[in-house]
Image (tube, rainbow, N blue to C red):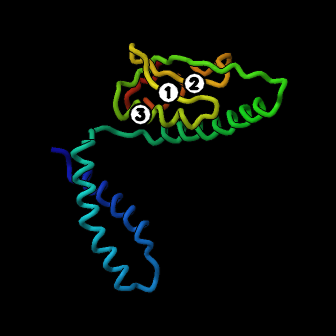
Amino acid sequence: MLPARFALARGIAFYGCWLLLADPRLPVTTELLADLAVGVPAAVAATWSSLHLLPPTVGRMRYGALARLIWRLLSQSVVSGVDVARRALSPRLSLQPGYLTYPTRLPPGPGRAVFGALTSLMPGTLPVGTDAAGRLIYHCLDVTQPVAESLAIDEMLLLRVLGEDDGHR
């Protein structure tokens, strides 16, 4: 059995979401108190469900790697967004849309879903599914760009965040 801290952390997060929905304002009213009281069993039910549907795994998140991943995603998002806008608005710059298959090291599950969600934020690429071999399929606005290399860097950083990479690629 996993430590109670996992359940406590999720419960606090769910109750925090409830507080955002309850819109607590001063002064305290009976309506607000009723909302807060209803939030406790709602957070308990959400915590119980989440622990059964997505059990926590023991592992360590590497926060330095997370900071590098966030920095890369933010900077690449700006660079890619400017490039896509420039290509879309300039009739002389050509787009060569197409599909790219990417052989990910991430197994099917939450990690791969996070990778797909993160890479979907990059302008010019969109994960659209997997092929029979389990490779991710991306739609790209320009297949002549180094999309696979960029995806490999993003994947390596995510693996480091999750503690699943030995630092080699």
**Mark 1: amino acid:** Val
Say the numbered circle drawn on residue 14: none
Kindly report the distance in space between the C-alpha atoms of the residues bearing marks 1 and 2.
Answer: 7 Å
Residue underneath mark 3:
113
68 left or right of 24?
Answer: right
Q: Is residue 141 left or right of residue 118?
A: right
Find the distance from the CA under tag 3 to the CA under tag 2.
Answer: 16 Å
Q: Which mark is residue 128?
A: 1
Q: In the visual, does 166 lie left or right of 118?
A: left
Q: Residue 47 placed where, x, y %?
A: 26, 55
Q: Are marks 1 and 3 in contact (CB under 8 Å)?
A: no
Q: Nearer the viewer, mark 1 or mark 3?
A: 1
- Whether pointer 3 and pointer 2 mark residues with C-beta atoms closer than 8 Å, the reply is no
Quadrant housing residue 21: bottom left
Q: Residue under circle 2?
A: 139
Vertical arrangement, residue 88 with respect to residue 67, above or below: above
Q: Amino acid at mark 3?
A: Ala
Instruction: Say which quadrant the N terminus sits in.
Output: top left
In this view, the residue in front, 137 or 148, is 137
Q: Secondary structure at mark 3?
A: helix
